[in-house]
Image: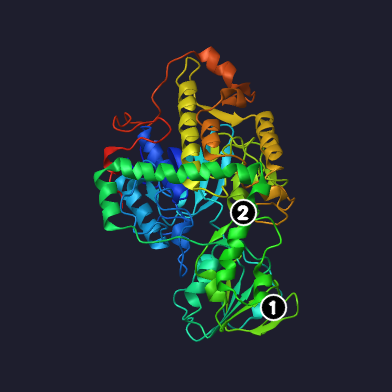
Amino acid sequence: MGGTSGTTGGAGGTGVREHVRVAVIGSGFGGLGAAVRLRREGITDFVVLERADSVGGTWRDNSYPGCACDVPSHLYSFSFAPNPDWPRTFSGQPAIRAYLEHVADTFGLRPHIRLDTEVRMIRWDADELRWEIETAAGELTADVVVSATGPLSDPKTPEVPGLAEFPGKVFHSARWDHDYDLRGKRVAMIGTGASAIQIVPAIAPEVERLTLFQRTPPWVMPRTDRAVTAVERWLHRQLPFTRAARRGMLWGLRELQVSAFTKHPNRLGLIESLAKANMARSIKDPALRAKLTPSYRIGCKRILLSSEYYPALARPDVDLVASGLKEIRGSVLVAADGTETEVDAIIFGTGFHVTDMPIAERVVGAEGQTLADAWKDGMQALRGATAAGFPNWMTIIGPNTGLGNSSMILMIESQLNYMADYLRQLALLEGSSLGGRVALGARPSAVNRWNRQVQARMERTVWNSGGCTSWYLDAQGRNTTVWPGTTGEFRRETRSVDLAEYEVLRVGERERVPAVAVAAAAGAGAAPLPGALPPDPRASHAGGAGVAGTAEGVA
């Protein structure tokens, strides 16, 4: 247990590094989901490496005032860990973080989790067919690495001339300074993304004056949030089919909307009209309304949900600067249009390193190049999971797995299905008549083919054709972030590993052999995975939708 069954030494100072079957990086939804799935597959020889002092990922890091999810609670949760007691229809950050903590407890993940263990470097050892992992807490090796760092983990702060000399307080929304008292301060909010539209109404009543610097206005729809009644919660606890029906309805409605985003953006005109009506209800000043009206098709950037954002902007002590921040002169912020504003504090709501994830700089593959170098012309991964030149490595929430209108937990669970089958196929090959340790590497031709298909489908989507520049696009203007289809389609595409898309590497052999050829030569018959326990008979492996008995009532 606890990922130590593969340890070959080290605790007694022998210098021999610990070895595990699987190393998972990150303990957000992706990392904890991977850990649960590994245990349900019977694998206990794994560790979860977390750089912070607690689990939760982005829902631990983002603790700013008003932080909440814009996906309904009953859809923004694991299918294998239903929560009948969500307090609101759209949950706030504290409730989601508590849910993830409870998942870690309920599924017995704590012994596997290594907190305060930031991964500094991961190198592929071609001779031993394993990953060498350097962390802040020491070194270890792993047969397989699952990267679940997520795209919303490393804040992006723009390089603004004069920022270093600003005499006041500066912080990013994802690194909120709770020790700094905003009351009575003149505050600048930089950015108008999903975080900013929650922060603005939350802090506007407290500060002396709030100035919002808006480079591009977002489309904002009402957020129909309410408390979940005691009767609803009782029904969901006593009659689980009501909870499943609610989740299914929320999922189905979003699946029906996908074609408007991916194939027929012109159908989004009605939604634009509703968004404009939402604005008009609170913003009576025509000049302000004009500044807040986007010039691009709705959906090109993520549609934001808030019923408090526009009323906050209508307050007399809130100013909108419809221009990006250009420079800082002392305590004065200068916008691109020349507007000057003196403030005491700056809050950056400027997003994250999504298309240039820092973890990619720390992964060195089979050819000696980093993942960042391999992706310098754009991220691409086979079925959003595996990259050519990086054997036995996969990512959760990888390239082109993001969504514009539904729950990312659905995509994560699909990738967990793929991860589980990847490990089964690896074990089959290792336990075959050929014997010995092997590794699976994505064939470059398969990765390229998959990426071409995804990018071809992307051309007609609203994210590419809607007339905006968004964080979905990389430096080359390619959309390497969003999935151009339904969540159902993605689940079908990741239900199992197609060995024709992989090649096999064996210890002592430099030649890469097509995986299908090796599988055919090996014949049938699966061997137990190293360090495995018998699978839990209560857990279903069909699509990851089965619920183990201990999962009921996760709070």
Q: Quadrant of residue 242?
A: top left
Pair 2/1: label in front: 2
The answer, for residue 256, to whether it is visible in the render is: yes
Tell me the element at label 1: loop
Residue behind mark 2 = 270
Residue type at numbered disc 1:
Gly
Instruction: Say left or right for 51 vs 11.
Output: right
The answer, for residue 351, to whether it is visible in the render is: no
Tell me the element at label 2: helix
What colouring does the structure picture have? rainbow
- The residue located at (47%, 41%) in the rendering is 252
- The residue located at (66%, 66%) in the rendering is 293
- The residue located at (73%, 46%) in the rendering is 377
Counting other residues with Cα less than 10 Å from the Cα at mark 1, is it few (<14), some (14-19), or many (20 or more)?
Answer: some
Of the pair 254 and 194, the residue shown nearer to us: 254
Residue 81 % position (x, y): 35, 44
Q: Earlier in the sequence, mark 2 or mark 1?
A: 1
- The residue located at (30%, 37%) in the rendering is 548
Instruction: Say left or right for 486 vs 263.
Output: left
Residue 322 % position (x, y): 69, 73
- Position of residue 47 relative to residue 182, above or below, is above
Residue 312 % position (x, y): 53, 75
- Rounded to the nearest angstrom, the CA distance separating label 2 from label 1 is 44 Å
Instruction: Say left or right for 413 vs 217.
Output: left
Residue 160 % position (x, y): 69, 72
Residue behind mark 1 = 162
Of the pair 290 and 79, the residue shown nearer to us: 290
Residue type at numbered disc 2:
Leu
Q: Quadrant of residue 543?
A: top left
